[in-house]
Amino acid sequence: MPDITPLAPMTPHTAISAFNYLRAVQADDADAAREFAGAETRMPELLVDVATRIVVPVTALPGPEAGEPCADTFALEALGRVFVTSLRIWAQAGAGTADGIARAVIDFVQQFLTEDHEDVADTLRQLEATGVGQALDRTPHRPVRTRCASPPCSARAAR
């Protein structure tokens, strides 16, 4: 039975944190990666969340408009589920798993999403923009209260 647990919405902050870490690992910047991982204790879980949002759309069965799926399509969908499930299990081992999970996500991006003329860093930036945009769309907007130096127009008119 496929895992159909809906993903909890990521906040813009968590999406940015996860992608900052991914880009630091991809650039082999161990100091920056350590700093980003230290700032976010749930980094392995965030990376699995990001991976799920990347892998599932790429490996999902096509809609009915694409015609009848073939055996390869079912295999790719199953492989995506196995990959994400493996990352999720791996993340349960603790904070030390973040580097390996990040490298697995980066390799997936390189193998499946990077075109010949692009590099992985460009693709990660595009994915981050999409992820942060989705997080912003799901973040409830609260009215901003500001203090005015002068009373509202209606109060001034009443004088």
Image: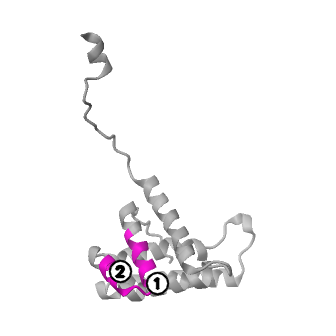
Whole-angstrom CA distance, mark 2 to mark 1, is 10 Å
- Residue 11 visible to the viewer: no
Tell me the SS state at disc 2.
helix
Farthest residue toward the top?
159
Q: Which mark is residue 69?
A: none
Please identify the quadrant where the C terminus is shown. Answer: top left
The residue singled out by tag 1 in the image is: 27
Magenta residues, start to end = 17-37
- Magenta span includes 72: no
Name of the residue lying farthest toward the right:
67
Residue flagged by tag 1: what amino acid is it?
Ala
Query: Identity of the amino acid at label 2?
Result: Ala
Which residue corresponds to the image point at 36% horizontal and 82% vertical from the top-left?
Answer: 33
Q: Which of the two residues, 56 or 123, is positioned nearer the viewer here?
A: 123
Question: How far from the left and from the top, in percent, is residue 51?
Answer: 47, 76
Instruction: Name the residue at 67% across, 66% down.
Output: 63
Residue topped by disc 2: 32
Left or right: 76 in relation to 19: right
Mark 2 / mark 1, whichever is N-terminal: 1
Q: Decide if residue 91 is on the left or right side of residue 1.
A: left
